Image (tube, coloured by chain):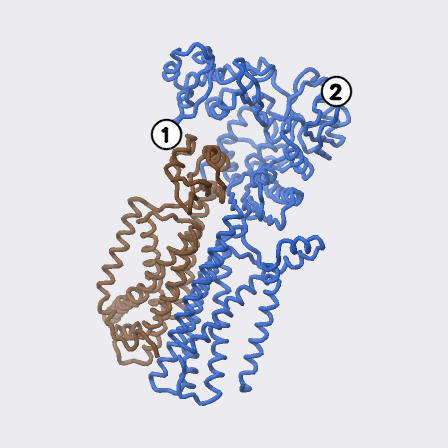
Chain colours: A brown, B blue
C-alpha cells in the first residue's frame, strides 16, 4: 500500500494557539485592507462598461490609454487579457452604449475586433450586490440549521465560524490584491462555503463516532485523534481538488481567472480551517459549557 | 456473478442506456459538418435534433444578453392628461426621488409624494377614481399590463428579425430578459428591440416662439459663469469666423463633471459668442436650426441642464433630427450638421392608429426617388384626426417623429385624407425594414431601458470552449493518474465511477434542455474533485479496516457502510450551497449551480452505488487474501 499520513499523532489541538495567531493576523490584514481600500467591485456589482478588444498589431496598455480621448471616459481601467488583447473598463457614467461607442471611436485608427462588450446599469449593479450578499448569508444560515439537526448546535457554531473565517480571509485577500469581484467570483465564494464545510463535516463525523467508541478519553484528545484519523483523506481530497482548480487557474483563461483563484484560495484556507480552526473551536465552546455546568452544580 | 447483485447491475445497465439515449443527439450534432447541418435544416430534420442537445451558453457560442426594464415613469407620463406647469414640477420631483433610490417602487414614491404634498392625481389621470391610492393602484395595474404587452411585442419583433432560438422571458414585475445567440450585428438588434416605435406627428412651434426660447437659454447659459466666457473671447484670429472653445468653459460644468481629462471642444460663432453663448453653437440651415456635429454634445448638455429646463415653456419639446447631414460651408469644406427642432409637447397623432407599414424604395416620381421610405396606413379614426390636423394647419410644418427623433418635417401643403403617409429621411433600406417591423409589431406601451447588456463575440466563445474543455481534460487526467497510482486497481474503479459521473451529469443537462456555460464547465471540473472525495473517503476507510486485521470482504463492507454517513453529510451541505446559487443566480451562475447540483446527486449514484457494486462483486465472489487498494 502506498500511503501518506497513516497513524499520525500530531498534536494539532495543542498547537491551536498558533492557528489562532495565524488566522487572527490574516483576518486582521484583510479587514485593514478592507477598511483602507475596500473591495474592487467589478462592473457586475457597480455598474459600468467593459469592452474586450483584440488588436491586429502589437499595442501596449499605455498606447490604448493615450488613444482614449473622450473626456466622458474618465480614467478607464485597462487590463491585458491575451496577446494584443485588452479589457477596458469604465465605471458607471452615462449610458453604456454611448461609452462603448466612444471607446470604439477613439480607437478607430487601429484595427481591432470587439470580442466582448458588457454594460451593466448602476441600479442593477447595486441590486445584484445586495442579492448576492443576501444569498451568502442565506446559505450560511441554512447550513447552520442543517448541522444543528445532524449534529449539535456547538458543532454548527464551530463550522459556521470556520466558514466565516474562510470567507473573511478569501475576501481579505481579494481586497489586499484588489482582485476584481465579479459574479463568477461570488459563485466561487459560495462554493468555498460548501467545500470548506465538506472538509469540516468529515472531521466532525469522526469526532461524533470517536466520542462513542472512546468514551474514557478527554474531549480534546478525541478531537485530536479524529483530526489525525481524517488527515489522510483530507490531504488527498484537497490535493486532487487543488489540482483541478490549479489547472483552471493556469488554463481556464482570463474569464475564469477570478473564479478559479477564489476557489484555489478557498480550498487552501478551507482545508486548514477544518483541522485547525473548526475543531479547536469546539473545545472552547465545550469548556465554557462545562464551566457553566459546574457552576450550576 | 452472484444473484444478489443482479438487481444492482440491472439498475446500472438501465442508467447507462438512458445516459446514452440522452447524449447521442448531442454527440451526433457536435460531429456533424456545417454543410450537413445546413442540409438537415433545409429538410426540417435539424430541429428535432436541436431539441435534444446540450445547448451552449452565450459565453461559449457568442451572442447577446439583454435585460430590459420598462420605464414606468415614462409610461405614467404618457397616460397623464391636462399637463400644467405644476404637474410637470410635481412629476419631476417624483422622478428625482425615483432615480436617487435603488430599491423603491416608482408608484410607492408617487403615492407617498402625492399624499404629503396634497397633490390631486385625479386632475391629471381622469377616469381612474377620485382618491390618490385608487389612481395609483390603477396605474400600477396598467404598468404590469404594459410589461406583459412589451414582452409580447418584443417577441414578435425578434421573431421577424430572424435569430435562431431566441429566449425572451419576464423577470420580476418590470423586467424582460432577451437572449439572442450568435447575433452578428448587436447594435441593430438592440435598436430593433428597444425602439419604442413610437410614431408621432407633431406640429412645429412658430419661429417667434423658438426665437424666444433660444434667447431664454442664452440668458441662462450666460449667467452660469460670465467670468470664463469673457476670457475665451479675446479675438486673435479674425480670418475664421468660427472658434473652438472647451465645453467646460462654455457653460461651467459642475466640478465632478469637469474632472474628466482632456477637453471636448465646441465650435462657436465668434461674433455672437459673448452676448449669446448658446446661439453661438447653432447655425442656420435654411429654415431650420443646424448644429455642427461636434457641437452635438455641448448642445445636449445645455438642453439637459435643469436651469435651462426651468426657463423653457412647459409645452415645448426639443428634438434632434435622426441622422447628421453633410453640407458645404462658406469656405468650401464639408461639414456634418444635425437639425434641431422645437415642437409641441403633445403629439397631435401617435402611431397607435397605424394599421400597416411597408418599407420600400421610393418610386420614380416625387422627391424621394430611389430613397428608402416606409408607407404607413392608418385606421379610420387615425385618418380622421390626420385629416383634421393637416386641414387646420395648412402652411405650417409638421414633424414626423419616430422614437423622439425627427425623421422629416415637411410643410403641410394640403389636407391629407385617407390616412396614408410616408416616412422619409432614412439612411438605408435596412433601417426602413426595421421601422416596418417595429410599426407592424406595434409600439411598445412605454420605452424600455437597457439596464444590462452583454455581448460576446463568437471568437471569444470558441476560445472559451477550447480553454474550458482543455482544463477539464487535463484536470481529469491528473486526478485519475494520482488516484490510480495511489489506489491501484481500486483506483481504476474510482476512475470508472468518475467518468460515469460526468456522463450522467451531461445526460441530465441534455434531458433538461439546460445550457452549458463556461462556469458550467468549471462546475464539471469541480464535480470531478468532489467525486474523488467520495472514493477517497471510502478507500481510506477500507484501508483502516484492513489495517485492523479484518478480512477483505468485511473491510469492504464496513468501509462502504461507514463512509456513506460522512458522504451524505458532506455532500448535502454542498447541495445547500448549490441550491442557493440556483435560486439567486442569473445566467452563467445558474449554469454553474445546475451542474454542481447534479454532480453531487450523481456522486451518490456513481461514487457510492456503482463503486460499491463493483468492489463488492469482486470481493464477495472468491475469498481474496489481498485487495489492491
Q: Residues within 10 Å of mark 1 (few under 14, many from 20)?
A: few
Query: Which of the 4 image quarters holds residue B270?
Result: top left
Which residue occupies 36% across, 45% down?
A: A40
Q: Which residue is mark 1?
A: B259
Residue closer to the observer: B391 or B429: B429
Query: Which of the 4 image quarters holds residue A232?
Result: bottom left
Q: Quadrant of the C terminus of chain B?
A: bottom left
Which element is circle 1 on? Answer: loop
Residue B321 in picture, x, y percent from top left: 58, 25
Q: Residues within 10 Å of mark 2 (few under 14, many from 20)?
A: some
Q: Is residue A86 above or below residue B274?
A: below
Residues at marks 1 and 2 touching, judged by CB atoms closer than 8 Å: no
Query: Which of the 4 image quarters holds residue B137?
Result: top right
- Protein chain holding label 2: B
Q: Is residue B52 left or right of residue A243?
A: right
Q: Where residue B415 is drawn, which disc sits there?
A: 2
Quick one: label 1 or label 2, which is nearer the N terminus? 1
Is residue B96 visible from the viewing direction of this image? Answer: no
Q: Is residue B227 above or below residue B629?
A: above
Q: Is residue B417 above or below residue B599?
A: above
- Protein chain holding label 1: B
Which residue occupies 29% across, 80% down?
A: A215
Residue B623 in picture, x, y percent from top left: 44, 90
Q: Is residue A153 above or below residue B34?
A: below
Residue furthest toward the bottom? B623
Residue furthest toward the front? A57
Which residue occupies 39% across, 41% down?
A: A78
Q: Are the residues flagged by discs 1 and 2 from a single subunit?
A: yes
Amino acid at each position: 500500500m502506498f500511503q501518506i499520513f497513516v497513524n499520525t499523532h500530531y498534536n494539532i489541538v495543542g498547537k491551536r494557539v498558533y492557528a489562532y495567531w495565524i488566522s487572527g493576523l490574516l483576518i486582521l490584514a484583510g479587514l485593514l485592507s478592507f477598511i483602507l481600500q475596500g473591495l474592487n467591485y467589478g462592473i457586475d456589482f457597480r455598474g459600468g462598461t467593459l469592452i474586450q478588444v483584440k488588436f491586429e498589431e502589437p499595442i501596449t496598455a499605455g498606447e490604448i490609454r493615450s488613444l482614449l480621448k473622450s473626456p466622458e471616459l474618465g480614467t478607464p481601467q485597462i487590463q491585458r487579457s491575451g496577446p494584443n488583447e485588452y479589457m477596458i473598463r469604465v465605471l458607471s457614467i452615462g449610458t453604456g452604449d454611448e461609452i462603448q461607442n466612444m471607446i470604439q471611436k477613439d480607437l478607430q485608427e487601429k484595427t481591432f475586433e470587439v470580442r466582448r462588450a458588457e454594460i451593466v446599469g448602476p441600479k442593477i449593479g447595486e441590486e445584484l450586490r445586495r442579492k448576492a450578499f443576501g444569498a451568502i448569508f442565506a446559505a450560511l444560515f441554512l447550513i447552520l440549521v442543517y448541522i444543528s439537526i445532524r449534529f449539535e448546535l456547538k458543532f454548527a457554531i464551530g463550522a459556521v465560524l470556520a466558514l466565516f473565517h474562510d470567507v473573511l480571509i478569501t475576501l481579505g485577500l481579494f481586497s489586499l490584491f484588489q482582485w476584481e469581484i465579479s459574479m463568477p467570483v461570488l459563485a466561487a465564494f459560495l462554493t468555498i462555503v460548501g467545500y470548506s464545510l465538506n472538509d469540516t463535516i468529515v472531521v466532525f463525523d469522526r469526532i461524533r463516532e470517536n466520542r462513542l467508541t472512546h468514551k474514557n478519553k478527554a474531549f480534546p484528545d478525541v478531537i485530536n485523534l479524529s483530526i489525525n484519523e481524517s488527515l489522510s483523506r483530507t490531504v488527498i481530497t484537497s490535493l486532487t481538488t487543488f489540482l483541478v482548480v490549479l489547472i483552471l487557474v493556469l488554463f481556464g483563461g482570463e474569464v475564469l481567472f477570478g473564479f478559479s483563484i477564489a476557489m484555489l484560495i478557498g480550498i487552501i484556507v478551507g482545508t486548514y480551517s477544518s483541522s485547525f480552526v473548526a475543531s479547536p473551536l469546539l473545545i472552547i465552546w465545550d469548556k465554557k459549557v462545562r464551566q457553566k455546568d459546574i457552576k450550576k452544580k | 456473478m452472484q444473484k444478489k447483485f443482479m438487481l444492482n447491475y440491472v439498475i446500472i445497465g438501465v442508467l447507462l442506456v438512458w445516459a446514452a439515449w440522452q447524449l447521442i443527439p448531442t454527440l451526433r450534432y457536435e460531429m456533424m459538418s456545417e454543410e450537413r447541418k445546413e442540409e438537415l435544416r433545409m429538410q426540417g430534420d435539424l430541429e428535432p435534433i436541436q431539441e435534444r442537445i446540450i445547448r451552449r451558453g452565450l459565453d461559449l457560442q457568442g451572442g447577446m444578453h439583454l435585460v430590459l426594464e420598462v420605464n414606468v415613469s415614462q409610461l405614467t407620463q404618457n397616460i397623464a392628461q391636462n399637463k400644467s406647469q405644476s404637474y410637470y414640477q410635481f412629476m419631476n420631483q417624483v422622478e428625482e426621488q425615483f432615480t436617487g433610490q435603488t430599491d423603491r417602487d416608482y408608484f410607492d414614491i408617487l403615492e407617498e409624494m402625492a399624499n404629503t404634498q396634497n397633490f390631486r392625481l385625479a386632475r391629471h389621470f381622469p377616469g381612474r377614481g377620485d382618491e390618490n391610492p385608487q389612481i395609483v393602484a390603477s396605474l400600477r395595474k396598467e404598468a404590469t399590463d404594459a410589461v406583459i404587452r412589451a414582452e409580447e411585442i418584443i417577441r414578435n419583433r425578434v421573431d421577424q428579425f430572424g435569430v435562431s432560438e431566441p429566449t425572451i422571458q419576464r423577470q420580476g414585475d418590470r423586467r424582460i430578459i432577451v437572449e439572442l445567440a450568435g447575433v452578428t450585428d448587436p447594435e441593430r438588434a438592440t435598436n430593433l428591440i428597444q425602439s419604442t416605435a413610437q410614431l408621432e406627428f407633431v406640429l412645429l412651434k412658430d419661429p417667434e416662439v423658438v426665437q424666444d426660447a433660444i434667447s431664454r437659454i442664452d440668458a441662462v447659459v450666460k449667467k452660469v459663469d460670465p467670468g470664463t466666457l469673457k476670457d475665451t473671447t479675446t479675438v486673435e484670429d479674425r480670418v475664421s469666423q468660427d472658434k473652438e472653445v472647451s465645453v467646460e468653459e462654455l457653460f461651467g460644468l459642475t466640478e465632478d463633471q469637469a474632472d474628466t481629462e482632456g477637453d471636448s471642444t465646441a465650435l462657436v460663432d465668434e461674433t455672437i459668442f459673448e452676448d449669446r453663448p448658446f446661439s453661438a453653437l447653432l447655425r442656420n440651415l435654411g429654415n431650420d436650426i443646424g448644429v455642427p456635429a461636434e457641437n452635438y454634445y455641448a448642445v445636449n448638455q445645455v438642453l439637459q441642464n435643469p436651469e435651462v429646463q426651468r426657463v423653457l415653456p412647459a409645452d415645448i419639446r426639443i428634438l434632434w433630427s435622426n441622422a447628421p447631414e453633410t453640407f458645404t460651408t462658406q469656405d468650401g469644406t464639408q461639414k456634418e450638421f444635425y437639425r434641431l427642432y422645437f415642437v409641441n409637447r403633445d403629439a397631435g397623432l401617435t402611431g397607435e392608429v397605424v394599421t400597416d407599414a411597408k418599407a420600400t424604395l421610393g418610386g420614380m416620381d416625387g422627391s424621394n426617388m430611389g430613397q428608402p421610405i416606409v408607407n404607413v396606413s392608418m385606421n379610420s379614426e387615425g385618418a380622421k384626426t390626420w385629416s383634421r390636423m393637416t386641414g387646420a394647419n395648412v402652411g405650417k410644418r409638421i414633424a414626423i417623429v419616430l422614437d423622439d427623433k425627427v425623421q422629416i418635417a415637411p410643410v403641410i401643403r394640403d389636407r391629407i385624407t385617407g390616412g396614408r403617409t410616408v416616412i422619409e429621411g432614412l439612411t438605408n433600406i435596412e433601417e426602413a425594414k426595421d421601422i416596418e417591423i417595429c410599426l407592424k409589431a406595434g409600439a411598445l406601451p412605454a420605452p424600455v431601458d437597457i439596464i444590462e447588456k452583454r455581448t460576446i463575440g463568437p471568437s471569444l466563445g470558441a476560445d472559451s470552449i477550447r480553454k474550458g474543455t482543455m482544463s477539464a481534460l487535463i484536470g481529469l487526467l491528473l486526478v485519475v493518474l494520482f488516484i490510480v497510482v495511489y489506489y491501484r486497481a481500486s483506483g481504476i474503479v474510482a476512475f470508472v465511477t468518475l467518468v460515469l459521473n460526468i456522463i450522467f451529469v451531461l445526460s441530465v443537462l441534455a434531458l433538461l434542455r439546460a445550457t452549458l456555460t463556461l462556469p458550467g464547465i468549471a462546475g464539471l471540473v469541480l464535480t470531478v474533485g468532489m467525486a474523488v472525495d467520495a472514493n477517497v473517503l471510502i478507500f481510506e476507510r477500507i484501508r483502516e479496516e484492513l489495517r485492523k486485521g479484518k478480512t477483505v470482504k468485511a473491510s469492504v463492507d464496513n468501509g462502504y457502510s461507514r463512509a456513506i454517513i460522512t458522504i451524505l453529510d458532506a455532500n448535502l451541505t454542498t447541495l445547500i450551497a448549490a441550491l442557493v446559487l440556483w435560486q439567486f443566480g442569473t445566467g452563467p451562475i445558474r449554469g454553474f449551480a445546475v451542474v454542481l447540483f447534479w454532480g453531487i446527486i450523481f456522486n451518490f449514484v456513481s461514487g457510492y452505488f456503482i463503486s460499491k457494486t463493483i468492489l463488492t462483486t469482486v470481493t464477495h465472489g472468491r475469498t481474496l487474501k489481498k485487495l489492491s487498494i
